[in-house]
Amino acid sequence: MKPKDHIKIPNPKVGVILVNLGTPEATNYKSMWIYLREFLSDKRVIELPRILWLPILYFIILIVRPKKSGKLYEKIWNKKKGISPLKEITIKVTEKLRGKLKTEKVQINYAMNYGNPSIKDVMTSQFKQGCTKILIVPMYPQYSATTTASVVDNVNRVLKKMRWQPTIRFCPPYFDDDIYIKALCSHIEKKIKKSKPDKILASFHGIPKKYFLKGDPYHCHCAKTVRLLNERLKKTKIKIELSFQSRFGPQEWLRPYMNEKFKELIDNDNKKIMMIAPGFSVDCLETLEEIKMEGQEEFKEMGGEKFEYISCLNDTEESIAMLKQIVKRELSGWI
């Protein structure tokens, strides 16, 4: 029998948190400054010694970059809703997945690794509502210390301050999961039925080459995703090639760079291409502005004739069906 002054404990539930990278709250200078400071202060993202990096960050980058980045975000911003595509689509994915996993025992929410709603706020809220077991789903198919490990770090920082900690599971990377490959192939096949390109170029967000040399498996995960896509799409006779974009700073990053592949494709008379970004779960600044807009402009300036961008899986039927299977599998034994 409970003592009269016993704290109220809600009925036990299972929580699922879909964690995406993050987004600024608005495109103005202050919002961009807050977002960039949090993102670029992450030791997983920038591995330079703090004594070298922080003066560069605060006295150069955070003075110049917010205005520039804000202008880029304005190109893709949903002005009516006052929200970025990444956040808008992540909300839709969460709502649709919630509809597919209808059960009172499972509570599904989304969080941002940088920005709002934060991992801390969502974890705290779920626990208060009775989620004593929580599945964290980093929305990154390919593992990298700069993304997946950063999510794990943030979750552990929250746990460190909790007296009563929930049991945590982390969804593993699914870069070579047949469920993910099938979803991507179905998505691609719908596009190439309407218009057949000479080649498809898959572009992933790059990381510094030295991170790979230190043991980050990201390059290998990206390459395997592309290999598996080619194997499954062999009958289409359209080859998918690998590239990386979003370089930052003077050091060498993973190659081949996207613009290098553009030149190679055009030189080999592959002037009609489609581009896809399999490393992104939902469309965002990097896919909509850097690839779809800037990439297309650069490709055509180099002599390319036709450029089509294949959207991310976003909140498509393929995406929700894939996430449902992955989440149900990772919740095994809990529900």
Image (cartoon, rainbow, N blue to C red):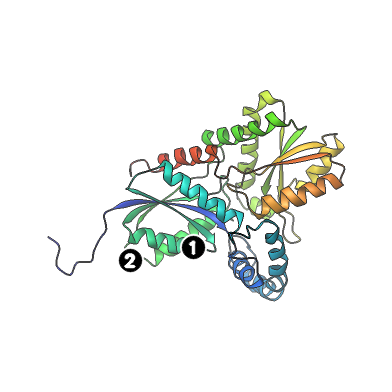
Identity of the residue drawn at 67% across and 60% down:
73
Work out how far the residue at label 1 is from the one at label 2, CA to CA, in angstroms.
19 Å
Instruction: Tell me the quarter of the image containing the N terminus.
Output: bottom left
Residue 172 visible in rendering: yes
User: Mark 1 touching mark 2, by CB under 8 A?
Assistant: no
Helix, strand or loop at label 1? It is: loop
Residue labelled with disc 1: 118
Helix, strand or loop at label 2? It is: loop
Closest to the observer, 126 or 154: 126
How far across and how far down the image is residue 283, in percent? 62, 49
Identity of the residue drawn at 60% across and 66% down:
35
Task: Using the image, determine if residue 5 lies above or below residue 323.
Answer: below
Q: Earlier in the sequence, mark 1 or mark 2?
A: 1
Identity of the residue drawn at 41% across and 60% down:
123
Q: Is residue 259 left or right of residue 172?
A: right
Closest to the observer, 185 or 96: 96
Q: Residues within 10 Å of mark 2 (few under 14, many from 20)?
A: few
Outermost front residue: 80
Number of marks present in the image shown: 2
Residue labelled with disc 2: 163
Q: Is residue 56 left or right of residue 168?
A: right
Task: Using the image, determine if residue 271 lies above or below residue 84.
Answer: above
Disc 1 versus disc 2: nearer the observer? 1
Q: Tell me the amino acid under the disc marked 2.
A: Arg
> Residue 129's image quarter?
bottom left
